Image (tube, helix red, strand yellow):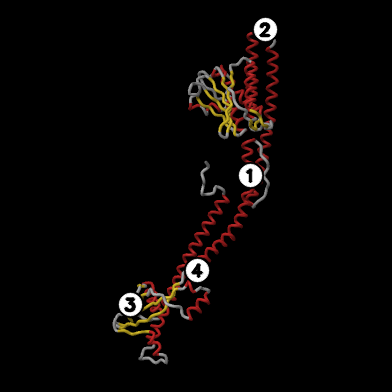
Amino acid sequence: MRRLRPWPQSIVGQIIVLVALALFVAQAINFTLLLRERQRIELTAQTAPGVYRIVDTLDNRPDRRGSDDGERRGRVRFLDAAPSLQGTARPDIERRARAMFDDVGLSVRSIHAVEQSQPLPLRRWDNFRLRAGGDSHSHMRMTRLAMAVEYQPGKWALTQTRIGDRPARFGGWLVGQTLILYVIVLLPLLWVGRRLARPLKQLTGSAEQFARTGSADPVEERGPGDVRQLTMAFNAMRSRIFAMLNEKDRMLGAIGHDLRTPLASLRVRAESVEDEGERARMSETIDEMNRMLEDILSLARAGRSTEAQQKVDLSALADAVVEDFLELGSPVDLADSERVVANVRPQQIRRALRNLIENAIVYGERAHVSVERGEGAIRLVVADDGPGISEDRMEEMMEPFTRLEGSRNRETGGAGLGLALVRAIMAEHGGALKLANRPQGGLEASLVLPL
């Protein structure tokens, strides 16, 4: 089961997620500042009427003249003792009122403010203000605020005002603003990201194709300037590598031709040796040199095969290889298996399987071949009855020119290129060569091919 990854792996996805998170944090900070500012404005609107009445009334006390002096005193009551106020204390209004008194230069000794919980009916002015602000009556709750201020020792001024409690309505507006901001910012970013990701994806695909098959298609040079320069550099490197590989193939072909000529001359001379035993040993040496030369050239050309892939029944292919060994009298057996079809280069798979069977016969006395189909892979298994390989030398044995001492010495085989060539063939097919010791003894070598 594939594990879900909350963090995207592509560079475009990471950029979009980071920008989205940054926008969210910025909008959260903006919302917090707006909320604090709105609360300050609401608090000022609730406090200002009472402060204004008290300041206006104190500025127009009986010792000062004023035409509407009676009306002002009617809104504010003067007491000689601290009044007993019933309701919910509003320390926030008390702090705001003290700050407003200080702003107008009026020093007060103490302030008490309470809010009565009983709702009040809306007045005509309240209805007009609500309609002007676009609010509905159901969202407005009017209560009474009582504020008592000790302006002189033992001298109190008491006033009552109406305050409204409206729920904040800008939350939905802020959400809509955030969504619009996401659309304005993320859509162009997504377009730029796709324009950036498309050539990078082609570049990755071409590199993977080269690693898998030894050939790669050129990448279309498009996208932003930096990406286009990267693509141009990749195409130039690709052309340079292909030129070097072609030169290597031509050089290997020339070397192979130059070496086969003296080997053929040696074979002709060996036929003229009168001693039959000596002639046979010389022929075997020449054959071994030919096989070694062929293995070296094949390993050097690994990944550059010109053979086309085709769908092949691997069970039939294994049966044909085993039949060739049986005709030579080799101890090989093939287990019954169902038909398994894969897209492979048949001559290369045939050679890889032949190398494993030859190793099993030489080092393990007998080869047991089977074809298995598992989850997402096909396995061509060659097991033997030999001593096996120590676990710490499994990987080493798949390196070129590597051989074991003891039972696997130079007298029993070639130059140690068989497993290295098999691994190169499997890498070209996107598969792998697996070695494991059998519990009952012997070595098990598997050609693992993807379905």
Horizontal arrangement in the rendering, residue 115 relative to residue 332 (left or right): left
Rendered position, 57 above or below 449: below
Q: Residue at x 52, y 41 (%)?
A: 1
Circle nearer the N terminus (2, 3): 3
Which residue corresponds to mark 4? 169
Circle nearer the N terminus (2, 4): 4
Tell me, for residue 217, which label it has, or none: none
Kindly report the distance in space between the C-alpha atoms of the residues bearing marks 2 and 3. 136 Å
Which residue corresponds to mark 1? 203
Kindly report the distance in space between the C-alpha atoms of the residues bearing marks 3 and 4. 32 Å
Tell me, for residue 85, which label it has, or none: 3
Q: Quadrant of residue 55?
A: bottom left
Kindly report the distance in space between the C-alpha atoms of the residues bearing marks 1 and 3. 79 Å
Where residue 274 appears, x then y in whole percent? 67, 7
Secondary element type, mark 2: loop
Q: Nearer the viewer, mark 1 or mark 2?
A: 1
